[in-house]
Image (cartoon, grey):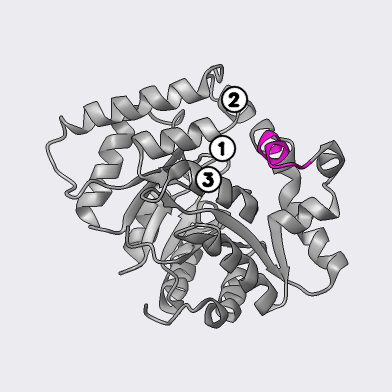
Amino acid sequence: MGIGRIGVWHPLFGRAQAQAVRRAAGEIEKLGYGALWFGEATATREAFTTAGILLAATERVAVGTGIANIWARDAAAMAAGAAAYGEAYPGRFVLGIGVSHAPLVSRRGHDYARPLAAMSEYLDAMDAAARDLPFSDDPRTPRLLAALRPRMLELARDKADGAHPYFVPPEHTVLAREILGGDAVLAPEQAVVLETDPARARRIAREHMEPYLRLPNYANNLRHLGYGDEDLAGDGSDRLVDAIVAWGDVETVAGRIRAHLDAGADHVALQPLPVDLDGAVAQLTELAPALGVLPGE
């Protein structure tokens, strides 16, 4: 896919002023990271708009939606947007798509009753729409699913090119690889913070985790991995916080990234937790040598 082994996931790619996003994207590309990822929510830019800003601001780095919400556009629009970027920026665009979460989907006026079936039907509709496009993205723009649980991972294996899981520890990567098999791409996100003080690091981690722990998809996935109600209660147990957010010095954080790779990940998307892009770039600069990221790679 041309995304390399290590990429960067950051919510501000879809929220910050375009000038700041362009500057940060250029700096991250110069550091040698292989891909830029971002989410799509009600408080962000539309996903293809964000992708366009990032692609135009860079020359080599891949750009991936992580994720584009299937409820935000119909399958024909998703297929056309993906193919257009695949044609315009060969080898540089990855379409990550997902079913989002019931509370967010209901705000858009949709019914979240059958998310797995909805995704399967959506992928079929994308394939049908792509056949009628007047332009070609050859080879086809790769697509990854925001898959957490086994049945969605199976769908990512059977009807997509792999999975882009979010908010997962390395033990999920082990299970995901077992389901996906050896051919599908596995590109998990990993939140990181360079902070050696446990109290401060966990405070930063909990501020990041708090909204996700309220979403059933993430909570149920963590239960599936063996985390109990005592871990999920309140703002999360220390055990859960330490599993979801890699914190410590450079070598400790780099060790968590290697744990995902050793567990079967093809690519890991780091999410630096500083709330501003300048802080994120500073942490990425510190981490790059330990991760084997080379300037201009």
| Location of mark 1 (residue) | 42
- The quarter in which the N terminus is drawn is bottom left
Q: Nearer the viewer, mark 3 or mark 2?
A: 3
Side of 69 relative to 215 (left or right): left
Q: Residue at x 48, y 54 (%)?
A: 187
| Location of mark 2 (residue) | 107
| Location of mark 3 (residue) | 176
- Amino acid marked by disc 2: Arg
- Estimate the x, y position of residue 77 in percent, counting from the top left: 31, 32
Total marks placed: 3
Q: CA distance from mark 3 to mark 2?
A: 30 Å
Give, as a single range, the part of the protein colored magenta: 219-227
Q: CA distance from mark 2 to mark 1?
A: 9 Å
- Amino acid marked by disc 1: Thr
Tag 2–tag 1 contact (CB < 8 Å): yes
Which quadrant holds residue 96? Answer: top left
Q: Residue at x 48, y 63 (%)?
A: 21
Side of 46 relative to 290 (left or right): left
Judging from the image, what secondary structure is the residue with disc 3 in? helix
Side of 96 relative to 13 (left or right): left
Judging from the image, what secondary structure is the residue with disc 2 in? helix
Q: CA distance from mark 1 to mark 3?
A: 28 Å
Judging from the image, what secondary structure is the residue with disc 1 in? loop
Above or below residue 220? Residue 202 is below
**Foreground of the two, 253 or 212:** 253
Secondary structure character of the magenta stretch overall: helix
- Estimate the x, y position of residue 99 in percent, counting from the top left: 50, 31
Queried whether the magenta region covers residue 242, the answer comes back as no
- Estimate the x, y position of residue 14 in percent, counting from the top left: 51, 51
Q: Residue at x 61, y 48 (%)?
A: 172
Specify which label sits upstream in the sequence, 3 or 2: 2
